């Protein structure tokens, strides 16, 4: 069965929004029917993303679908006077993230049975959030990308602010202000590109593919000069780094995670953080290769610092959820490190580019692996919190004897986050550290030491929570085994953590060609800039002579 590309991509994005509209007509007292309806819409969305995977050609490195006239993606006029289009497409970078989004949203919806307050409003906002996230990963018009980015912001603000913990208002406002600040910086860069592309045949454009060609020096007579690229890259990087999040733009994350309800923490860690990494890969690096190369060393340092800082911060926590939140800061540092190991020099033409490609693949795989393991860790924290209503690590202990199935699933998922060989967290980290060694052995050693620190806080957490004498803390009488719904969510996440760990080719096969194409195009874009500078310098020298 084959669906038209426009219909399929539109259906993937707006099926959750259609579900939200459908739920608006339900009686607010019909809680169980509303939950089942929302779950059905998330399952249908996931099935549609499987159709997308079926249509995707891993051998084609560029944006798909490819039209008969050679144009890429699907595009329809939206706001003609500003040359804004409803432009969608996918490649080996976006397809895995679309699959991850629909997958985590489906499982987080199963975890949402614990939400008992204002269920109708929660489900509507939840589905609107999914639409915003999917739109970000499929949009090829910068303006459309920005709209979906903002659509995602408001539902998350209310989901934390209404259904969160005791300090939910503070956490929601902090999340909103940080993300809004990043959005403003992104908007400034977007307008710089729009007005800088006014010499295109069709006039100024928000087309990400066209802007990429300009930034990489592939459009005759039009370019974004060095100053524009460096300025725009810094603005974009800060905007996306807030979402990743990397040190020092991370401070909103622990508060948001601690106060958010369990299903929203799963989405926040499993999907939203990946939007920052995707923005760097899709927009910041391709449109501003000169700016990216200019900032590469600083980005590698920030990535290494994030790894170590996040791990030490996690070691210091006594709140179970805050510990997992800081582990996300540490693990996402590998993503930035792998993306940024772009070495220009004598060995850049061969060995350096191969290591950079390894780092890019490792960073992308780390995003997917972290999406699975972090969602699982937050879910496991939520399972025990729903029973004992506290997260104090010093008051836990002995849960293995009371909840053996829960303990087994939790141990497997936490070991996946640790980076144990054979589980999903190992592959990306190894690829990133190997690529970093070629860039800077010192920074690679610093990053690798994060693995030891991660093992420290994960093993210490397992010891404090699951081992030792029987639990005697608050609400000990409420500790009962996992129900079938909880076991289903935990088991599925653990199974996929194992699959990604023992068969990473399942994702590498999808992303390999697109990543190779991205690395080659970025390197060529920088070489185009260097050649133009050399040509200008020679011309000036000739005039002076």
Image: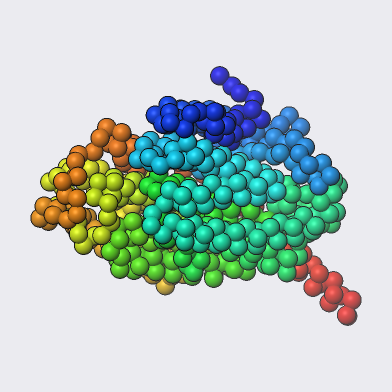
Does 21 appear above or below 344?
A: above
Q: Which one is in front, 72 or 192? A: 192
Dividing the picture into quadrants, the one containing residue 92 is top right
Does 115 appear above or below 229?
A: above
Does 4 appear above or below 113?
A: above
Q: Which one is in front, 109 or 61? A: 109
Query: Is 527 left, or right, of 391 in this rendering?
Result: right
Residue 454 position, x and y percent, is 31, 61
Residue appearing at x 14%, y 53% in the figure: 471
Residue 354 position, x and y percent, is 52, 55
Residue 446 position, x and y percent, is 39, 70
Q: Which one is in front, 167 or 248? A: 167
Residue appearing at x 52%, y 52% in the figure: 157
Query: Does residue 188 show up?
Result: yes
Query: Does residue 502 show up?
Result: no
Residue appearing at x 34%, y 43% in the figure: 497
**Quadrant, the N terminus:** top right
Residue 171 position, x and y percent, is 46, 59
Residue appearing at x 81%, y 47% in the figure: 82
* Farthest-out residue, top: 1
Dividing the picture into quadrants, the one containing residue 450 is bottom left
**Quadrant, the C terminus:** bottom right
Does 390 appear above or below 383?
A: below
Count the marks: how many?
0
Query: Is 86 left, or right, of 502 in this rendering?
Result: right
Dividing the picture into quadrants, the one containing residue 525 is bottom right
């Amino acid at each position: 069965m084959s669906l038209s590309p426009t219909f399929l991509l539109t259906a993937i994005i707006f099926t959750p929004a259609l579900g939200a509209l459908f739920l608006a007509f339900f009686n607010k007292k019909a809680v169980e029917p509303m939950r089942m309806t929302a779950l059905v819409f998330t399952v249908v969305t996931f099935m549609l993303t499987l159709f997308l995977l079926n249509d995707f050609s891993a051998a084609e490195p560029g944006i798909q679908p490819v039209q008969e006239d050679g144009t890429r993606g699907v595009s329809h006029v939206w706001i003609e006077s500003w040359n804004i289009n409803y432009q969608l497409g996918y490649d080996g970078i976006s397809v895995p993230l679309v699959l991850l989004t629909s997958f985590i949203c489906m499982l987080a919806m199963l975890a949402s049975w614990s939400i008992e307050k204002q269920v109708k409003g929660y489900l509507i906002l939840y589905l609107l959030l999914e639409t915003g996230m999917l739109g970000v990963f499929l949009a090829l018009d910068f303006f459309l990308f920005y709209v979906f980015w903002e659509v995602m912001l408001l539902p998350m603000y209310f989901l934390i602010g209404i259904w969160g913990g005791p300090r939910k208002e503070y956490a929601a406002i902090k999340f909103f202000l940080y993300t809004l600040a990043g959005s403003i910086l992104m908007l400034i860069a977007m307008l710089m590109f729009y007005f800088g592309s006014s010499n295109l045949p069709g006039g100024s454009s928000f087309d990400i593919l066209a802007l990429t060609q300009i930034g990489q020096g592939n459009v005759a007579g039009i370019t974004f000069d060095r100053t524009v690229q460096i300025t725009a890259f810094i603005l974009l990087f800060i905007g996306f780094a807030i979402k990743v999040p990397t040190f020092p733009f991370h401070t909103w994350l622990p508060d948001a995670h601690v106060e958010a309800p369990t299903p929203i923490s799963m989405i926040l860690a499993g999907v939203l953080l990946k939007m920052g990494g995707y923005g760097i890969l899709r927009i910041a690096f391709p449109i501003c290769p000169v700016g990216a190369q200019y900032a590469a060393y600083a980005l590698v340092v920030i990535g290494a610092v994030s790894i170590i800082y996040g791990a030490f911060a996690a070691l210091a926590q006594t709140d179970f959820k805050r510990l997992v939140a800081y582990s996300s800061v540490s693990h996402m540092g590998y993503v930035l490190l792998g993306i940024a190991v772009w070495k220009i020099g004598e060995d850049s033409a061969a060995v350096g580019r191969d290591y950079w490609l390894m780092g890019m693949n490792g960073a992308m795989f780390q995003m997917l692996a972290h999406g699975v393991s972090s969602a699982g860790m937050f879910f496991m924290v939520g399972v025990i919190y729903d029973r004992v209503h506290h997260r104090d690590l010093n008051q836990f202990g002995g849960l293995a004897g009371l909840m053996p199935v829960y303990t087994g699933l939790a141990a497997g998922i936490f070991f996946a986050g640790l980076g144990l060989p054979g589980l999903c967290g190992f592959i990306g980290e190894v690829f990133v550290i190997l690529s970093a060694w070629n860039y800077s052995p010192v920074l690679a050693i610093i990053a690798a030491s994060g693995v030891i620190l991660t093992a420290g806080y994960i093993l210490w957490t397992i010891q404090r929570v699951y081992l030792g004498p029987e639990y005697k803390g608050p609400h000990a009488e409420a500790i009962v085994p996992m129900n079938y719904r909880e076991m289903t969510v935990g088991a599925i996440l653990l199974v996929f953590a194992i699959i990604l760990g023992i068969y990473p080719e399942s994702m590498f096969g999808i992303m390999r060609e697109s990543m190779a194409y991205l690395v080659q195009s970025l390197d060529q874009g920088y070489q185009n800039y260097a050649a133009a500078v050399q040509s200008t310098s020679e011309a000036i020298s000739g005039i002076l002579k």
